[in-house]
Image (spheres, coloured by chain):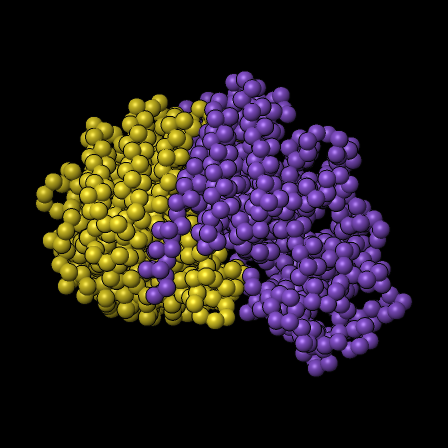
Chain colours: A purple, B yellow
Amino acid sequence: MYRAPVEEMVFTLRHVACAGDEALDPDLLNAVLEEAARFASNEMAPLAESGDRQGLKLQSGTVTMPDGWKELYAHWREGGWAGVMAPDQWGGQGLPVTVAMAVHEMWNSASMSFGLCPMLTSGAVEALAHHASPELQDRYLPKLISGEWTGTMNLTEPQAGSDVGALTTRAVDRGDGTYRIFGQKIFITFGEHDLTDNIIHLVLARIEGAPAGTKGISLFLVPKILVNEDGSLGSRNDLVCAGIEHKLGIHASPTCTMVYGDKGEGAVGWLVGEANRGLNAMFTMMNNARLAVGIQGVALAEAATQKALAYAGERRQGRSARHEGSGMAPILHHPDIQRTLLTMKALTAASRAICYLCAQALAEAEGTENKPFWAERGALLTPVAKAFSTDIGVEVSSLGLGVHGGMGFIEETGAARFYRDARIAPIYEGTNGIQAIDLVARKLPLGQGEHVHGFIADLREVVEAVRTSNRPGFGATAEKLGAALDALTEATRFLQSAEPDSALAGATPYLRLFGLATGGVLLAKGALADEGESRTALCRFFAENLIGQATALKDEVIGGAESLARAADLLLAS
Amino acid sequence: MYRAPVEEMVFTLRHVACAGDEALDPDLLNAVLEEAARFASNEMAPLAESGDRQGLKLQSGTVTMPDGWKELYAHWREGGWAGVMAPDQWGGQGLPVTVAMAVHEMWNSASMSFGLCPMLTSGAVEALAHHASPELQDRYLPKLISGEWTGTMNLTEPQAGSDVGALTTRAVDRGDGTYRIFGQKIFITFGEHDLTDNIIHLVLARIEGAPAGTKGISLFLVPKILVNEDGSLGSRNDLVCAGIEHKLGIHASPTCTMVYGDKGEGAVGWLVGEANRGLNAMFTMMNNARLAVGIQGVALAEAATQKALAYAGERRQGRSARHEGSGMAPILHHPDIQRTLLTMKALTAASRAICYLCAQALAEAEGTENKPFWAERGALLTPVAKAFSTDIGVEVSSLGLGVHGGMGFIEETGAARFYRDARIAPIYEGTNGIQAIDLVARKLPLGQGEHVHGFIADLREVVEAVRTSNRPGFGATAEKLGAALDALTEATRFLQSAEPDSALAGATPYLRLFGLATGGVLLAKGALADEGESRTALCRFFAENLIGQATALKDEVIGGAESLARAADLLLAS
């Protein structure tokens, strides 16, 4: 059963993500995380497997959540968790994004299906808090932040996925401050459910006569139930959940097809922010949402690692020179299983460090000093946090399944659920391919191309500290990390001056290189801040076993594009 | 929909697996494969998805297969496919293992659940053909080879998985030439079904008084329905399917818990081969079975690649400099998607080449010349074929799911089925960790440690031929493949003189290195035999984008064990 790694989270927040202790009050941090851990482990995790097995039921437009989930949500809301990150102006707790992300990690380790509900609501809160009129804010934010209602984000349409500019949902201006929305949206997470009395949809649509493409998209607030002047619930809006998807994973998270305006009059909606600036409003929330998805990758990797470790300690097969007892050894003592488990632990810790570092940058960007610098840093790290961590989520959950041998393939064991759930995270909220292109095309140019090199210089300082520490437990860590940073620098400079097509071709291996090098250095940063030997040993394992790929990835970035283009012409286009 | 890549298979068999054309009659080869392709594509593939969705039903010990599968099996049997590889002495077609494996690939691409049934029966046939008494052979082999009955292999017990020596199923000698079997077996593929009138179980058990461990295990033939003297079916034996597993994938393949002797008298069984030499009999069939599982990895990679390519050619999103038409480009034209698709194609082709090369060695070992050499070559390549190819099956099916974006996560799309099915292949028939240990501990010492170097020398000849070909399309292929072989040689020599514990620690990265280097060289061998440009381009893509990891893997093998041991002591054992 999942136990939230509070100590590890606190350490990573305080010593890896932050420069030192000053940014976060350790007492508050511990108190919040311990309480969140209790809820995640004791209340949420026990319902994850039954929720996965039972799944969801759609009848006459109503989605019934699995048994016990309505009560779970109510407890969660009563605990005040809905407003963790939300601004205190509307009743939120206003905790920094760093702390919120640690809590978010726990929920997603316990149940990724559950974790999606607050994730989407947070996104809606953020968009409204930044862009909506004061009237809309006052009417909707307090109830979204208290968890009385939930929120959704409606972007995707069948022909408009990664290419959001292709969307066709229409908005008709009624001239009375409202619009009427007509269209169909797909893949709407928690678009319909029975946990709350109302659901507030944020919907991207095109006002009649707006320009084509991304410059003609506006954002609308469209409640499931219309809200009266006095705040009470009124009549049903003209929108319906027309279907839920039968998915590989996250079986307790309703993925809905939403139809707006099917009855003819259109769904009543209110413009959020300026007309035709809807994508701008979406992007406000997108950095946090992408980081939150990265955290889901960390969460599944953590849950899978805990489960595999527990199994490997109990399951006995064969003998091992590393096991002193009589009879069969726990498989934990076999070197090949140890390699797997350490790989899982190291990749999980590295991806957590990257995500928390990104969270810290986003938090600083909301603070008072050096805001533009921190905004750039957050922007640089966001695609890495999202894509690297969700890839790690898939890889580690696959490794964890394998540790269970044949039992891993049996659904009742629970390891397969992580493997199934994890696979969506590299896809949604911008596919990992899109993240890699974002990193190369939009983030490497930040600060006239110098911001990224400043970041790498920060990493080099850590490596230098490892070198001068003379701590024997580090082994070849400094040398290996240094080589990885050399590779990162070389690949970065190459991409910064490459032809666009060649840069696009190298984007995915570059992001992997970026994540590996950064993750390795952050493990070293943690090890340096800890006098114990364990972090040093894990960092060294990462450096001597996992980071060697960096040079090959650099070669792939720099030398791979021509053969890719040639082979693509010959093999794919036919 | 799956289309068997007959041309690619024939080419790989004739020009990559074999030295030249002489070994296989091209007309016969084409005729067999075209007919098998027709069956796989037109009859088998259409039932794969409905079979996955409907799954299996167990009631009163009887397993009901999905709708249409009984008829499918009957057609398949009428087509004479059950005896493809079986010796003609008992009615088989006696085709070489190479051809049989190509056919097996098609069935598993079309439906891995279906493909498992003949795979297990083939294993039973082989064990009986090599070890059973003439009486048992004459009574059982003709009906197994005609497909009138199917066969199973019963090894695993709850406490005895990878450690088969821990099994406790008992056999009592009745002194009349029969034994009575008592015990429980788990994970028995096609242990019960309604496709045939009888099922012939091969069961590992311990004769009362036998030595402990692997040296006290015997193999028994235990039919579901006892067979009368005249060959007709008699009474039901004392064995029952007590449960079927609820699995991540292969939903139409019954994975059964079999209980023997539950009524009290014991299940009637006949000894196959010598008493206490049961593992020996199992190992006879294990090389082919492991190769057959490797082929399953190839099969899923192929099916996933075909599906992703088709989708990428149809799905339009965004614009690309590589797409000349107006409007959105098929995603096939985006460089990042091209990288994914080419990676899938290249890894699939490389793993197929390794499996077919292994098949060729096993076929030669059954031939007339240099049998001991070919037996060693087959033994060396078998763990690589099994583990590398099944890892590729998982990786490529995951990449393929991703190409579909959000649709990939929807079960009806079908890409998720490959991702689910593929995950068992690295586990069963000896986990990939066990394969890696087998490669390092038992296969590297073959021929006083020289066989593997002879194999690498063969690979070097191909690289030399690439170098001297001066074909510009090869780019840096010779250099990259040469570096990979240098890494392989260095890692091999290290492991051949390493301490056992350190060798075990490096086994998994070593096997990956072996597979990558061999696969890359085999693609080059194919390219050299083909005057067209496509194979050269794919080989170059592999060399310049995928094989660079080889050096990092070598470093991991040579330099990774100490940090692994240290981190394991500190982090895992607590």
Q: Is residue B209 left or right of residue B317?
A: left
Q: For the view shown, which residue lies furthest in the bottom direction?
A: A264
Residue B451 makes an appearance in the image: yes
Image quarter (top left, top right, bottom left or bottom right) of the N terminus of chain A: top right
Q: Residue at x 40, y 35 (%)?
A: B552
Residue B508 vs residue B291, the one in the foreground: B508
Residue drawn at x 70%, y 82% is A264
Rendered location of residue A439, percent (x, y): 56, 48
Residue A208 coordinates in the image, percent (x, y): 68, 76
Residue at the spot x=24%, y=62% of the render?
B7
Q: Quadrant of residue B36?
A: bottom left
Q: Nearer the viewer, residue B29 or B552?
A: B552
Farthest left residue in view: B368
Total of numbered circles in the picture?
0
* Residue B298 spot, x, y in % from top left: 34, 53
Of residues A346 and B294, the one nearer the viewer is A346
Classify A171 as above or below A93.
Answer: below
Horizontal side of residue B537 vs A532, given as left or right = left
Along the line of sight, the residue nearer the viewer: A357 or B289: A357
- Asked if residue B90 lies left or right of residue B442, the reply is left
Question: Can residue B223 be seen at all in this image of the molecule?
Answer: no
Residue A515 position, x and y percent, is 53, 41
Q: Name the image quarter holding the C terminus of chain A.
A: bottom left
Residue visible at 82% across and 76% down?
Answer: A176
